[in-house]
């Protein structure tokens, strides 16, 4: 069983917790303790929301699906047997929910440009990644963000997921395998093909 | 084709930069309350499919369906075997051919020769037979006797006049 990242580092969002003990919060949440539920939501909300957002590229959909994920998890918390960490189990719910949503809707996702933090707002670092030798050099930050999201949307749900979990969120292959219920070799293969496809879609912007 | 390492590096940096895409400020402050409010609402009644998914283990369900199919096939096979045993053919030459009692199917209320059923409600006996005591007796037709005079019978041969 892999340790969830949040057990190692302090809570990422919300209030800082002196000591994070996932199992204790899960057992309290099982008994209907709303404070424990609140703590679990605050602990994982950014990661869950982030994964869903990068899969859908839409803020409203991501917000709805993230809420549904937590609600589903708390309503079925009795079925959580502890074979994996709560974090991985939660991720699985989020991922399945999102993939089902993407497959059932099959709609053209309206790409939304969300607010970014101040550090990101300068955008110079990102624009520096765009080739200066191509006609695309005048692309602005928002446009580039939209282009990247559009390229991600062209990937299959599984390829998009593996790129999101690994390249955007930085999860290790083993944990992605647990979340996606496949072995690490499959994760690596999917990641390789997903990157190749992304490179092909973004070749005009990446050429050196 | 192997990806260009420089391009690959740029791609990874681009993807990593997506982590900085955040929702509107204050979104995560309200998020937990929204979840807990929705959690306190009564859960929607699960659909039949959801209940099946929750309560039935797919592997066991598949095994049960397989067992039912095998059982049904066995029962059908046994039944067929019994039927075949009951209608075992007699030795050649000893089988009696039963004459067809009603080859045209007239006794079975079917239209002779076609096998189509007769509609009893529409078929009515002749009127004269309906009420035999009503005095409707057959009467001879009124024919003028001169009509037959000087007429030769059709089966007589006329003698040639020389």
Image: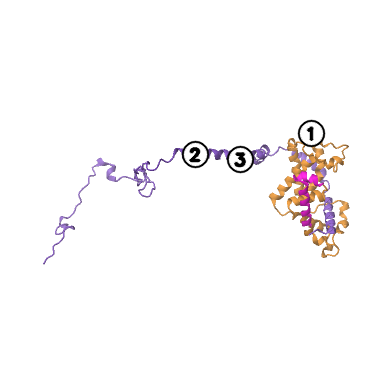
Residue on which disc 1 sits:
A27
State the separation of the CA atoms marked 2 and 1: 60 Å
State the separation of the CA atoms marked 3 and 2: 22 Å
Q: Nearer the viewer, mark 3 or mark 1?
A: 3
Q: Tell me the subunit letter for badge 3.
A: B
Q: Colour of chain B?
A: purple
* Residue furthest out toward the top: A31
Q: Is residue A174 magenta?
A: yes
State the separation of the CA atoms marked 3 and 1: 39 Å
Q: In orange, which chain?
A: A
In-front residue for pair B130/A146: A146
Q: Which residue is rendered at x = 79% and y = 33% of the image? A: A27
Q: Please tell me if label 2 and label 1 are on a single chain.
A: no
Q: Position of residue A131 (x, y in %)?
A: 85, 62
Disc 1, SS: helix
The answer, for residue B68, to whether it is visible in the render is yes
> Image check: B63 left or right of A180?
left
Disc 2, SS: helix
Residue on which disc 3 sits:
B66
């Amino acid at each position: 069983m892999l340790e969830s990242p949040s057990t190692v580092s302090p809570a990422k969002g919300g209030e800082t917790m002196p000591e994070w003990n996932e199992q204790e919060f899960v057992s309290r949440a099982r008994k209907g303790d709303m404070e424990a539920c609140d703590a679990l939501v605050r602990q994982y909300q950014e990661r869950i929301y982030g994964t869903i957002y990068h899969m859908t590229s839409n803020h409203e959909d991501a917000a709805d699906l993230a809420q549904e994920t937590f609600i589903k998890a708390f309503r079925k918390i009795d079925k959580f047997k502890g074979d994996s960490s709560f974090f991985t189990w939660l991720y699985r719910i989020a991922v399945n929910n999102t993939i089902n949503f993407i497959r059932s809707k099959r709609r053209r996702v309206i790409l939304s440009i969300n607010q970014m933090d101040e550090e990101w707002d300068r955008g110079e670092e990102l624009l520096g990644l765009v080739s200066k030798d191509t006609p695309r050099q005048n692309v602005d930050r928002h446009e580039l963000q939209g282009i990247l999201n559009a390229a991600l949307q062209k990937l299959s749900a599984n390829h998009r997921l593996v790129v999101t979990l690994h390249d955007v969120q930085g999860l290790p292959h083993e944990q992605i395998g647990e979340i996606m219920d496949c072995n690490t070799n499959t994760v690596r293969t999917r990641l390789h093909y997903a990157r190749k496809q992304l490179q092909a879609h973004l070749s005009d912007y990446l050429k050196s | 084709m192997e990806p260009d390492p420089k391009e690959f590096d740029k791609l990874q940096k681009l993807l990593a930069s997506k982590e900085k895409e955040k929702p509107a400020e204050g979104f995560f402050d309200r998020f937990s309350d929204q979840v807990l409010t929705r959690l306190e609402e009564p859960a929607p009644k699960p659909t039949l499919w959801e209940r099946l998914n929750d309560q039935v283990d797919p592997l066991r369900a598949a095994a049960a369906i397989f067992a039912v199919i095998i059982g049904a096939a066995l029962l059908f096979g046994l039944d067929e075997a019994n039927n075949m045993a009951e209608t075992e053919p007699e030795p050649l030459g000893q089988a009696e051919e039963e004459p067809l009692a009603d080859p045209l199917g007239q006794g079975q209320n079917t239209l002779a020769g076609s096998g189509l059923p007769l509609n009893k409600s529409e078929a009515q006996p002749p009127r004269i037979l309906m009420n035999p005591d009503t005095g409707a007796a057959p009467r001879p037709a009124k024919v003028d006797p001169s009509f037959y005079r000087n007429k030769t019978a059709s089966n007589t041969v006329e003698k040639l006049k020389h």
